[in-house]
Amino acid sequence: MMTYQAPYKDMQMLVEQAYLQHGLDKQEALEDFDIELANAVMEEAAKFASGVLAPLNQVGDIQGCRFDDGKVITPEGWKDAYQQFAESGWVGLSLPEAFGGQGLPKYISQPVNEMWLSANLAFVMFQALAQGGSEILLKFASESLQARYLPKIVAGEWTVAMALTEPNAGSDLGALTTKAIPQQDGRYKIKGQKIYITYGDHDLTDNIAHLVLARTPDAPAGSRGISLFLVPKYRVNEDGSVGDFNDVRCTGIEHKMGLHGSPTCSISYGDQDDCVGELLGEVNQGLMGMFVLMNEARLNTGLQGVALGELGYQRALQYAQERTQGSNSKGERVAIVQHGDVQRMLLEMRSEVFALRSLGYQIAAQIDLVESTGDNSARDQVALLTPIFKAFSTERANVMTGNVVQVFGGMGFVEETGVAQFMRDARITTIYEGTTGIQARDLMFRKVRGDQGQALSALLVSIESLANELVSDDSLAHIAKQANQAVVVVRQLMVDQLLNDATDEDTLHAVSVPFLEAMGTLCCAWQLMNATSTAAKANIEDQDYYQNLMAMTQFYGAYRLPTAMASLQTVASAGMGLKAFDFQQQ
Amino acid sequence: MMTYQAPYKDMQMLVEQAYLQHGLDKQEALEDFDIELANAVMEEAAKFASGVLAPLNQVGDIQGCRFDDGKVITPEGWKDAYQQFAESGWVGLSLPEAFGGQGLPKYISQPVNEMWLSANLAFVMFQALAQGGSEILLKFASESLQARYLPKIVAGEWTVAMALTEPNAGSDLGALTTKAIPQQDGRYKIKGQKIYITYGDHDLTDNIAHLVLARTPDAPAGSRGISLFLVPKYRVNEDGSVGDFNDVRCTGIEHKMGLHGSPTCSISYGDQDDCVGELLGEVNQGLMGMFVLMNEARLNTGLQGVALGELGYQRALQYAQERTQGSNSKGERVAIVQHGDVQRMLLEMRSEVFALRSLGYQIAAQIDLVESTGDNSARDQVALLTPIFKAFSTERANVMTGNVVQVFGGMGFVEETGVAQFMRDARITTIYEGTTGIQARDLMFRKVRGDQGQALSALLVSIESLANELVSDDSLAHIAKQANQAVVVVRQLMVDQLLNDATDEDTLHAVSVPFLEAMGTLCCAWQLMNATSTAAKANIEDQDYYQNLMAMTQFYGAYRLPTAMASLQTVASAGMGLKAFDFQQQ
């Protein structure tokens, strides 16, 4: 029942487009990682995703994780699937070859990640942690620590957990209070309580490497006094073998709305004063490590939006093709896919998922470009697009998975059907790894105001050039004209408001989400135009596919792009009504 | 923890406004039901809602109903609360005095219903069934049946259940197959399986009156062959006492995403060929009965959207005022209610709930007017506004309850917090009693095209006159101008498209939801302007309240009304991309 087939055709097309558009084919460093390899890897991953991971998705939701006698027990089949996942080398797919990984570039690992996330989001949460955790160790750990930890993490023998949040320090990490007391041997005793730790404890591996944010005794208040520590569940001997218990205790797991198969742990570090950690990087520079992780995590979370949208679309389409209800104008009973309003919901998902996927792959390819060449304009585009992608993709995933339930009608509300899970799972994606409000603040203040609008201006030029190319094509004139109008409005807003020092910051913050939504919608329109234009230029053989691509682009221009202009209008009337409203009284 | 306080000030203001604007104070028939009575009733209801029903809301969600040995067991406290509810006379609040009710007009019962729905939606689902069921019996049952059933239903001694849906007949009732075989004595043997029957079985009362749609042997196919039957769980003797079991068996209850406390039953009628029903109304006219119920149910479901939005807003506001996170521009740690983006979410809920409530109360008052005077233009407005209210209010409730979780952040995703329930409960409201797509179809085809746009034109005149009054007021010019523009665009669309016989029906159907959303948003703006204008004209004493009203109206004009124009733009480019897309291929 619970099936997922990787949307191979779309993925392949968008991977190749991103690869070529960012000139990855011309990078020597990527010689061994060409598009043929990408396709071969995707093909293997697609089989594993459909065959091994997808069948466990609903099992995980129904059974959930259990917390029993201090231990976390994952759902049936989890452990075996994990073994297969690790042994097939998927954990180390884009981790360095020096530590046993395959060193694949992001442009290949992103579609693969998308497949894992569609097939079984709750299960595969460990993967982004392994990726991000490894990057932190590569950047901040000593050679000796790297040698002891990285081969295990890359092979999937140990997992990584990130311990950031405390009850009073969520989005505001500066408020955390976990302590790190320096010892004679240069290590630290860790003591504190952390919550919301994904895979903070589980029964899949022998050891877990926790990355813990804590304060040394004389650390300054706030976020400038936070350091990062490597804290294994079991100590690691010099020879790399697993030693004594390190006083890292799981005290419970959350009973969540979704992601039941992914254990969200509360952990007590040093309850018996016997928890030892190693400093990573410099004292008080812990947030730097987090930023490394954060970009990775935001891209991954954005992909979760794509992945859930895709999974939902597949199920909704299948149901709509099978479910007979009502009749057409000739009075014949028809499948609901023939009803205009159901088509509207389906095509909204289809076009939006396609566009967001394209955006995500473009970011991934640009990260590879930056890695190879240090290209600054690509770096700036990645920085600008990442919060847009993370927040917009997940916000839309909430809408899309809601619409999946709507297509199913009453059946969708019944848990056995399995689609309510998608909506429940999606709900956290706009919250973790930085809420939508925080992404919007990052976009507005750091990414736009912070560089005086240069990266945004460059993005607008890209969109405008493409739209100008297409505006004379009758089929695409409607979307291209609107995109051009939106570009003009954004430019005007930059002058009047966004870059204007006279603008009040609180007021800007109150329209930062509408601004992000406008940019997200505009970027989706851009990517649909981009794909259609690429296919046309390449004289694509599959004309049916091309027709669908064109139809999706036209649809998006008619049904979704107008909302970008509405959001920009909201930005223009920033703060209206808000300052005057008094929340204290009814 | 789980609290709800009726928003008494808003309710009172909007009830009085609706009462006076529709001239109910001038109706002799309503002499005994004046605004003083309304306030007194609301005050009592508010106490009962907060004191008795609200504390059971989360209990119901956590425990849910159980199906055990063929019996449905409601959550702890349900039975006692039901007794109190019935004994206090709340079931019969607006049912006829002749059968023991209090005969209150809709304009009073609607705010009261809203309180029940906020306090404990899952619990109180029986109430709309008692109301709608009674109206059907009043209209279609013989005097003898009325005498035996109505006093029991009005007193809450028996509940009502509606058995419509079958596995292959959901939105499309014409496809149902349950049989009704005429017997010698004029009664019918009923045989068939029904699903999704709210309170179809439970442990709260001695008997349950099922209203069952079925087909007589020679009935024509489709919806013109459906008849309506009264089928009690236990037969009712001539003297009104409860007799033998009537072969009405619950075969299971659904495991749903939300509304866990409300049993959703599968029922087998006549499994032992011993289920007897009485025809209500004429043979093959069963859908007429359903239409009586449907209007009632749609208004009630629209109010559910208001109620869940209000409940969510109260909890989100309280949390935002208590939760400290981040700092203001002076570097002081602040409650999150001081962050612009959180204010945006809160004020969006606040203004939207207020506006939707006002719309719901306006419809209720117009129903009373129609009852008293038969006023045709009021009747047409009720018919036009009901699908807009039902669908738009519930669609927005999904967004609002999602935003409640967003305000709570990670805490919101944890079930113990209690707000995830609001979102799960809300999810069915856009589906049952006619999906959003079906409401939009009703609006587009029956209500707009069906009367050649007369009711819509009248509505546009109402909106325009008010906007014209306010457009010279600097504080309201922004919203009033936009409302006027929207009116102009809708009028043009009527000529070009909506009333144009040349327009393809499938294409119209594909933009019917965007059209409904545009109208819903415009109606909300209208109601906010209306309330602000009413308060200004009345020289309202409470200036702080007035300031907030004004702020909400301005906010809605800035943050929400622009989406109406975007939706209308979608309507104007109806069907673009949709016809060309082939869902058969990837």
Image (cartoon, coloured by chain):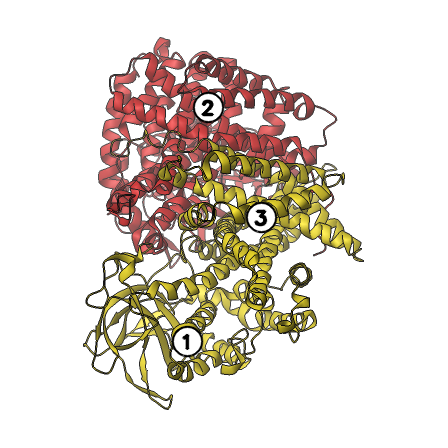
Chain colours: A red, B yellow
Distance from disc 2 to disc 3, alpha carbons, whole Å, reads 32 Å
Three-letter amino acid code of the residue under disc 2: Ile
Residue named by callout 2:
A479
Three-letter amino acid code of the residue under disc 3: Leu
Q: Which of the numbered marks, if any, corresponds to residue B159?
A: 1
Distance from disc 2 to disc 1, alpha carbons, whole Å, reads 55 Å
Which x, y percent locates residue A239? 35, 33
Tag count in the figure?
3
Q: Crowdedness of circle 3 by 10 Å Cα count: few (<14), some, many (20+)? A: some
Drawn side of residue A21 relative to residue A270, left or right: left
Drawn side of residue B409 relative to residue A62, left or right: right
Residue extending furthest toward the bottom? B239
Distance from disc 1 to disc 3, alpha carbons, whole Å, reads 38 Å
Kindly identify the residue that appears in the image at 67 percent across and 40 percent down.
Answer: B480
Q: Is residue B254 above or below residue A316?
A: below
The chain under label 2 reads: A
Q: Which of the numbered marks, if any, corresponds to residue B459?
A: 3
Q: Which of the numbered marks, if any, corresponds to residue A570?
A: none
Drawn side of residue A127 relative to residue A178, left or right: left
